[in-house]
Amino acid sequence: MPSDLLGTLYKAMTGLNAFTRGLDNLSNNVANLNTTGYKANDVFYRELEGNQQFGATGDDGSPIANGQGVAVGGTTVRFVDGELAVTGRDTDMAIDGNGFFVVRDGNKEFYTRAGQFEIDEDGYLSDPGTGYRVAKIDASGNIADINLRDRLLSSAVASTEVQLRGTLNASAVTGTVYPPQDATATEKVEIKAFDRNGRANTFFATFTKQAGGEWKVDFKDASGNLVGSSLTLEFGVNGAPIAQDLSQAISLNFFDLVDVETVRDRFSGVPRVSIEATPGELDKLGEITVTLTEGELVSKAASAGSSVSFLGNSTFTIDSNGFLIDKATQKKVAARDPSSPATLIDASIVLQNPAQASTALRLSGVLDAAAPVGDLYPPYTTDANGNAVQQNPITVQLYDAAGNTHDVSVTFVRLLSDANRVEYDVVFNRGQANEFKADKKLVYIRDGVPGNTGVPGAGGLLGGGNTGALVDALQWRLESGDISATWTGTDTAGAALTINFDLDVSGKDGAEALLLKTGSASAVTATQLSGRAVGKVSGLEIDASGKLIVSYSNGQSAEGPTLAVVDRRIEELKINFAAVNTAQFTTSGIQVEEVDGRATGQLTSFAFNEDGTLVLTYSNEDEVKDGRVAMALFTNTSALQRAGDALFTLDDTNERVLGSGTDGAFGKLVHKSIERSNVELSREFAEIIIVQRGFQAASQVLNATNELIQELYSSTRGGR
């Protein structure tokens, strides 16, 4: 009897425990009533197996089959669809069917019906709660993450064809132009063709009536300059273009200047050309060939409205005005405008380097400190006829402003010689009609160093035995090096002119000075420091950036223009005239029907089709399909394990099949919608009532059993 009561007590306790766990599950379901994509859990109970030891027996002593209470046998996920709700958000998705979304953490897969996604900072479509990335099936059938950042731009596509449509007046007189010069903006035949970088290049088509049934078609920019070669459009008797004119190609003159850094090393085969033997004779330069490894040069005729020519390489000459002329086109080669690099100018070189008047001479070497007063250097002798002749005269050339040369000789006349001071006159053209002197005397003084006498071998700071030359070289010092002179004469036309120049005798800038020494024979040289003749072109070369370097006969060089290297935007564009015709006595009217190609586009919107295809729409009207949202189906949904955040995992991926919307049983994808929780409150409340009643009944059994046990214990102790 006591054992039966204890068994009853135990069974009541299992009921309380099972109903508590059931209530806990119901509580979780109700709590997730508004959780997107949540799937409710159902608890199932199992009877505990009976036990002989605690089982009851009948009156005849046979055992009565009786269980040992109840236990929670587990839970099952209620995989029924929740209600679909429209949100309007581009990143929200729901599945109307049996499939699951696939989200990934690296290579690890999770599965969910909660399609409330967002785009993360890296551009991936992801689950906001976990950051796991939504998967797609790409064009190759591989699973990959959906990333929109890599798809923000739609690449440009160069135009290849323009289709025109309309009618031209076959009765128009020769020379009639359509559209007329005073046409309004809407009347003009405006064409916008895209280059490979997506830029729209605008030009206009004009039709000029020719003799017979021909029309000339010109293509011009807004300023009226030709941007391509003219086409001839001939019509047959039926008013349609003849077969060979239906589609014609033009090369447009729209281009980009290549920056100098990019241009470097594009030039090849440009050796230096020299005419040093015949400076100024430009015809001796011959033909100069420039070859580009990439890009093109440009040439342009001087006439207004003319088109340019593109040159993969150019053989050019230089005309008498210094312009570079392309041999093939006879047009001027184009160069960059130094003040406006985006502008083209005609390439030309300066044919002459300007003359420069002499402004300085340098006198260097040694004068003999021991020479007597009146001594001349260089010395004079008498020839056989008794004429005074200067030996080894010091002669230099002075340049006037026009570059003409004038020879002058330099003579040093000893004026004063004492122990501490020596003076010279610096005389030019001594003994000639145009003799002139420096404005100051050349004066040397001793440093006044005690003990130095200037006598060879004398004692002093340098000690005995030093030579007098070495001692004097240290002792004699130039009093002043600021000496100048003025030459007067006439130019080649006989007009009077003067040349003012300075004399450098102190050895400026580290050069050799004019020294006074004892025991050294006078030896002086004169060097022209400035002044030059007019320079004529003596050579030409082109550096790696396309810049011309011009050499001149006067030893100077100058930078010339930098050749313009361009990359063409549209090299060939077909003009389709198939829809153009002529008719008698009608008003001309031509319009652009279609131009292919497109600009670079920015992502403006995206959407998901029913089959899960991601469709991207761009500002350039491009539409791209970028894979299909991956979905998973399972042979056994009970194998799915909850992972929180409305996610499930699967131990064996062989039990799942990947596909996408509208593939079999996967279901269709519903864009801008989500699937709500499948928790039904009425069902949950009913379950709560049932659990509550069971709990109350088990409690009553527990209380009744407890009272019986208490009564039994009391009676055994002889209670009441």
Image: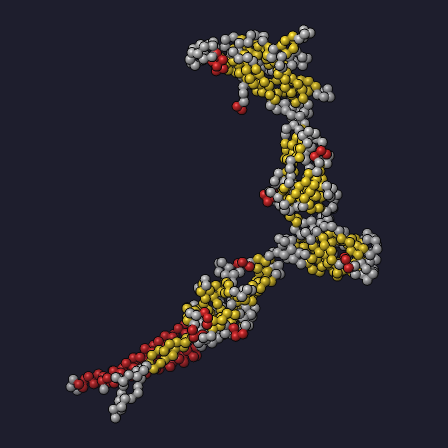
Residue at image point 30% right, 84% down: 50
Name the image quarter holding the C terminus.
Answer: bottom left
| Residue 138 drawn at (x, y percent) | 54, 64
| Residue 416 drawn at (x, y percent) | 55, 9
| Residue 703 drawn at (x, y percent) | 27, 82
Lateral position of residue 588 relative to residue 566, left or right: right
| Residue 626 drawn at (x, y percent) | 56, 63
Residue at image point 45% right, 75% down: 636
In this view of the protein, can residue 558 be seen by the observer?
yes
In this view of the protein, can residue 354 be seen by the observer?
no
- Quarter of the image for residue 268 reads top right
How many marks on residues?
Answer: 0
Q: Using the image as rendered, state which of residue 670 and residue 572 is in the foreground.
A: 572
- Quarter of the image for residue 705 reads bottom left
Residue placed farthest to the left in the image? Answer: 718
Q: Using the image as rendered, state which of residue 572 and residue 448 is in the foreground.
A: 572
Name the image quarter holding the N terminus.
Answer: bottom left
Is 270 drawn above or below residue 254 in the view shown?
Answer: above
Residue at image point 60% right, 15% down: 439
